[in-house]
Every structure is written in structure tokens, then in C-alpha cells.
Image (cartoon, rainbow, N blue to C red):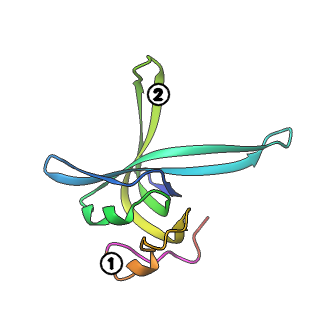
Amino acid sequence: MIKMQMIGYLGKDAVESSYNGKSVLSFRVAQTERFKNQQGVPQERTTWVDCAMWERANLAQYLTQGTQVYLEGKPYAEAYNSNAGEAVGVMRLRVQHLQLLAGGRRQDDASKPTADALADDALLEQPADDLPF
């Protein structure tokens, strides 16, 4: 089995849909790596991952644009040809575990709940203080 762990920010609000009678939340998460090239010039590389979380529709209200999350799940890649005829590759993740991270919104929005406010929700866990990375 292949397992992927990721910390990143939601690019848009999660979208709830139904497939074969089961609910699925779809959302995109970005992780940006900052580094310097051989000439010492700062560079950025953002990796987007399309995520699907099955049978967790009650979490949609918390998965809003800019929210920082920790995800674990099974990754897979897909390749297809775009409308312009270009070959395109997509990284996808079937989410098995999700945590909202404290202080997790890029833009402060006091009207949105934080991970601390959701501590009693049985589906979410408090973020660990000693993440392995």
C-alpha cells in the first residue's frame, strides 16, 4: 500500500456531491516549497493535489478556502489530454484522515471556526505538537 501525508492550504471551498448514492467532498490542496536555485535566486514550486473524502459531508462547512489541513490517504496519478491536446498529469488523494490545523487560515477570518473550536467533533483530532516533519 502507498500512503501519502500532506500539509497544505485549501485552494477553494470543498464541494459536496453524490456518486453511486454515497457523498463525497472534493477539494484541492496546495503545498508550496521555497528554495534557492544554483545561482542563489529564491524560487517557489507549488504542488496541487485533488482530494476526495468519502462519507464525511458534515465536514464541508469547515473546509473553506485558505484553511490549513493535514491529510493522510492513498495517492494516485492520472494522465489525460486537455482540450488543447496537451498531455496533463494530475495528483489525486483519497483522504482517509484529515485534521484542521490550529491557526490554519491564511487570511484571518474570525467568523470561521478553528480546529480548537471543533475539538469535540469525533471526526477531527487535535493537531499533534510534534509532527514527524
Q: Provide the major secondary structure of the magenta segment.
A: loop
The residue furthest right is 39
Q: Nearer the viewer, residue 85 or 89?
A: 85
Instruction: Tell me: 114 left or right of 37.
Output: left
Q: Position of residue 62 (x, y in %)?
A: 37, 66
Magenta-drawn segment: 123-129
| Quarter holding residue 55 | bottom left
Instruction: Tell me: 133 left or right of 10.
Output: right
Q: In the image, what residue occupies the spot 36% across and 54% down?
A: 14
Q: Position of residue 63 (x, y in %)?
A: 39, 61
Q: In the image, what residue occupies the spot 54% across and 68% down?
A: 108
Q: Does residue 123 sit above or below 51 in this rendering?
A: below
C-alpha distance separating marks 2 and 1: 38 Å
Q: Does residue 69 sit above or below 47 in this rendering?
A: below
Q: Which residue matches tag 1? A: 121
| Residue type indicated by callout 2 | Val
| Residue type indicated by callout 1 | Asp
Give the structural element (helix, strand or loop) at label 2: strand
Q: In the image, what residue occupies the spot 47% across and 46% down?
A: 49
Q: Which residue matches tag 2? A: 88
Q: Position of residue 39 (x, y in %)?
A: 86, 38
* Mark closest to the chain's N terminus, 2 or 1: 2
Q: Does residue 42 sit above or below 6 in this rendering?
A: above
| Quarter holding residue 57 | bottom left
